[in-house]
Every structure is written in structure tokens, then in C-alpha cells.
Amino acid sequence: MSLSLYDISVPAFQRGLDVLSHLLEQGVAHAQAQGQDPAQLLTGRLAPDMYTLIGQVQSASDAAKFGAARLAGIAPPSFADTETTLEELRERIAKTQAFLSTVTPQSMDGQEEREIVIRPGGRELTFVARDYIRGFVLPNFYFHLTTAYGILRHLGVPLGKMDYLRGAA
């Protein structure tokens, strides 16, 4: 049996978002244990030209919701990118997961050859659905998830590989 578009997208997004929420929880717990304000984590970044932790969480959320919506041929929810607290970031993750739970295998499966056109940064990119998920969406999603992990590690949060692999079968 081959994997379907749904199989390689929605469950991966759901698991990754669960991991992201866990990483944020670990960050809060660590900051509190150190007597620090957890809000200090929000502006952490790995390099001056990279997004902060806030931007990484927003971007992971966007990759999941836009990716699933485009593959299913439905409209994604709109989030304003106004999160300023860790709790608001966790709420955004929960809203993204709630949207993903509405996406069905039937809306995606059999659509592997459907054309998907996106316009990032003012340029137009055209994919067939199977290449869009494998070559664009999943790498983008995991980049932002991994970078959020890296920011928290950089800020001293004691995370390990198993925190990242949490929930992997």
C-alpha cells in the first residue's frame, strides 16, 4: 500500500505541532525553575537575520495550515500573527491543530497530480501536489520546528533528541 497525500501531511503536521507545544511547555518550566520570566524566550533567535521564537512558531503553524488547505483544495483559516506571549503561541498551535482535524483524507487522496500555485515573496511557484508536500511544505515545516527547538536549546532549555522525537512511532 502506498502512502497518500493525507498520510504524509496531516499526521506529520499534527505530531510536529504536538512537539512544538511540548517544547514551549519545557521552555516555560525551565525559565520558571531558574527564576526567570518565560517571556524572555519569545525574542530568542539563532542569528540576527532569522525569525524569533515567535516567528518560528507562527511559520510552522502557517506551513501546516496552508499546506493542508492547498492539498485539500479548501480555504485556510486566517491568523493575524499578533501573538506576544507563550500562551498565545500555544493557542495558535491549538487553533492550527483544530483546523487540521477538519481536513479529511478524502479531500486530498487521489489529488497527487493536481497543480498548486503559490506566490511567496512576489514570485510564482508551480508544483504538482505530491512534489509540493515533499519538496516544499514538509521541509519548510520541519525547518521552523527544528529552529524553534534550536532557539530554546540555545537559551539553555534542557531539551534532548527525545523531546523532538516525542510521539514518533
Image (spheres, helix red, strand yellow):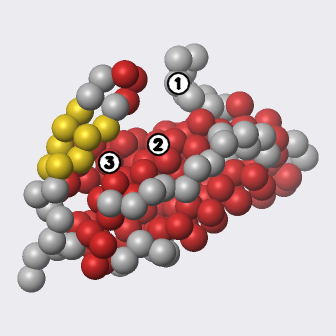
User: Can residue 156 be seen at all in this image of the molecule?
Assistant: no
Seen at 51% across and 42% down, the residue is: 59
In screen coordinates, is 142 left or right of 54? left
Q: Which residue is mark 1?
A: 50
Q: Which residue is mark 2?
A: 144
Estimate the spatial distance between the alpha carbons at disc 2 and disc 3, rounded to whole Å.
11 Å
Q: Residues within 10 Å of mark 3 (few under 14, many from 20)?
A: many
Q: Earlier in the sequence, mark 2 or mark 3?
A: 3
Residue type at mark 1 is Met
Q: Answer whether residue 39 is visible to the viewer in this image.
A: yes
Residue at 87% in and 42% down = 37
Residue 159 x %, y %: 58, 53
Q: Secondary structure at mark 2?
A: helix
Q: How many marks?
A: 3
Residue extending farthest top: 48
Residue at 30% from the left image edge and 72% from the top image edge = 107
Identify residue type, mark 3. Val
Q: Quadrant of residue 143?
A: top left
Residue beneath disc 3: 137
Residue 140, compared with residue 44, is above or below; it is: below
Residue placed furthest toward the bottom: 1
x, y percentage for residue 73? 33, 60
The quadrant where residue 44 appears: top right
Q: Is residue 27 left or right of residue 50?
A: right
